[in-house]
Image (cartoon, rainbow, N blue to C red):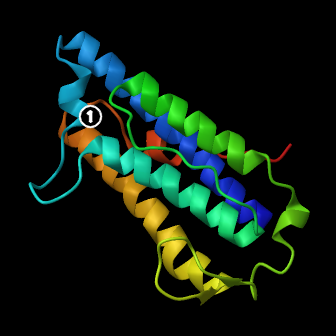
Amino acid sequence: MYAQITQFTKMLHTLSRLLDKAQGHAEANKCESAVILNSRLSPDMLPLTCQVQMACGTATLATSVLSGNQAPFFEDTEKTIPELKARIEKTIAYITSMKESDFNGWEERIVAPTGWAGAFIGKDYFYQHAVPNFYFHMVTAYAVLRHKGVKIGKMDYIGHLPFMK
């Protein structure tokens, strides 16, 4: 389980790098980064800022409920790229503060995330909600940036893979 949770960390670093590219794009094209951050693919979807916040929130919530630890509360008040990057860093700091032993028994642990109606078995919550929800918001953030013309590609999303020595 610990390895699966740390995959959130890798992807959050990726999200931070994508935001760097968005900042560079805004500067190169002399547009306000707020235009990019408030962009969405469809009028009825949440803007890029919310996609970043929700990816962070999903990683934080999954880590807390599956480890049995209290999640830190982060208000969704970020309005700039530096503020979103700071949110990502706070999320990474929380995730990486966990030890593998914090997740002992996670698969069968009964979890009841705050604000949700009902409880779930840990492995069902993780595989059927946390993972798909996290990647939904990651991919949507990537797609919004592509839509706005930020020069990113598949490898910017996948990131570097560790090579065997």
When the figure is inspected, residue 98 is found, relative to residue 21, above or below; the finding is: below
Disc 1 target residue: 37
In the displayed structure image, the side of residue 19 where residue 36 appears, left or right: left
- When the figure is inspected, residue 104 is found, relative to residue 32, above or below; the finding is below
Q: Quadrant of the C terminus?
A: top right
Name the residue at 57% across, 57% down. Answer: 59
**Residue at image coords 50%, 54%:** 57
Tell me what residue is drawn at x 42 percent, y 47 percent.
Answer: 53
Residue 18, image quadrant = top left
Does the rendering let one see residue 87? yes
Q: Which amino acid, mark 1?
A: Leu
Q: Residue furthest left?
A: 43
**Residue 68: image location, x then y, percent:** 76, 69
Indicate left or right for 111 with 115 as reference: right
Quadrant of res 13: top right
Q: Secondary structure at mark 1?
A: helix
